[in-house]
Amino acid sequence: MRTIALINQKGGVGKTTTAVNLGACLADLGKKVVLIDIDPQGNSSSWMGININELHKSMFNVFHDNLPIKEILHETSIENMWVVPSNVTLAAIERTLANKLENDTILKKSISPLINKFDYIILDCPPSLGLLTVNALSAVREVIIPLETKVLALNGLVTLLNTVNLVKDTLNSSLEVTGIIACMFDVRTNLSNKVVEKIKEKFHDKLFKSIIRESTQLAECPISSLPITRYAPDSRGTQDYMDLAREVVEGEKEVARYYEEDEAETSRHFDEESKEVDQQDDNDEDEIDQHSGEVESEASWQSGEEKNEADQRFGEGEKEE
Ligand SMILES: Nc1ncnc2c1ncn2[C@@H]1O[C@H](COP(=O)(O)OP(=O)(O)OP(=O)(O)O)[C@@H](O)[C@H]1O
Ligand SMILES: [Mg+2]
């Protein structure tokens, strides 16, 4: 199972449009998808046909009262796709939870009962890097960044990647940026091409090959309460999001490798720990000290190198701007 947060602190870049339509296309490809709306605007909830003004229970209750998510899992008009809704009540949660202990891992705990019951959990995040987004980053393994290609906004991307790295260092070491999606690509202008080239240059293979073109049907379809695949099945929006969904599914192998590495790392860690316990039993304390010293220096060397690389990358990004 994959857990993916769609994140960009910039508003109106295509997070919700991607969450709903990528989700629906994955569902059409036979994947079981849960779309969790953690944006107080509730845009993906209403897009999926939920009357957000009359919700009795929503993500607010998950954050505030530890309500199990399965109690607010709504079926949708799309087979294989469920939505967990939010509305404006969630706007108060950042303030309410400000002083609560472990307030950044509430979502992680609440989605854990869903793990392996679905193929994809997709989080539609608000346009900010506040507590809700940090909860999303703590809860998922993968980040996908929808990027508007109508403006060159690399500065925002650098800030976003810094936040992702901060959460990776502190709350969620398995977090990975799976990719960047070029959204609202305007085929008539040169600017969109330039933005795409720039992203490719800076972030190499992170840019998804499938590009989401600007389309009137995509802009219209939220009012229909249907994803693009049902609102305009023959449109370029359907074509682009189906291509993206296929590319995401193709990436499953790559992600499975991460998972395996992660699991191998965890079991290696346990093996080492139990080996150390055995050695302790033999009262071979000197050797243990030496061993842990080596491991420590190796670890700090690695994280130092990674940090340098990251600093260099962000430095370059900032300079560009
Ligand atoms: N490819 C596209 N072609 C045309 N219009 C689009 C496209 N993608 C998104 N839009 C429109 O752009 C606006 C912003 O998109 P969307 O709501 O998906 O962004 P968002 O990042 O979720 O915004 P917010 O940060 O406010 O949650 C919406 O009106 C949407 O219909
Ligand atoms: Mg949105």
Image (cartoon, rainbow, N blue to C red):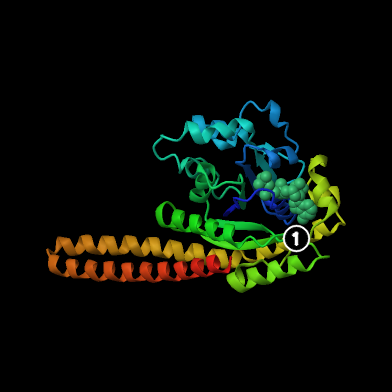
In the picture, the quarter occupied by the C terminus is bottom right
Q: Nearer the viewer, residue 209 or 253?
A: 209
Left or right? Give the position of 130 relative to 120. Answer: left
Q: Is residue 64 left or right of residue 225?
A: left
Q: Is residue 16 visible?
A: no
Q: Is residue 159 above or below residue 77?
A: below
Q: Residues within 10 Å of mark 1 (few under 14, many from 20)?
A: many
Image coords of residue 135 (percent x, y): 50, 45
Residue for point 68% across, 42% down = 82
Estimate the x, y position of residue 167 in percent, counting from the top left.
45, 53
Residue 274 percent across, percent down from the top left: 26, 60
Which residue is rendered at x = 65% and y = 45% of the image?
35
For label 1, the residue is: 212
Q: Is residue 59 above or below residue 285?
A: above
Q: Is residue 316 above or below residue 55?
A: below
Q: Decide which of 184, 170 is in the foreground and name it.
A: 184
Name which residue lies at 85% across and 54% down.
233
| Nearer to the camera, 213 or 79 | 213
* Label 1 beta carbon less than 8 Å to ligand 1: yes
| Residue 106 visible (yes or no) | yes
Q: x%, y% of residue 8?
A: 61, 52
Q: Amino acid at mark 1?
A: Ile
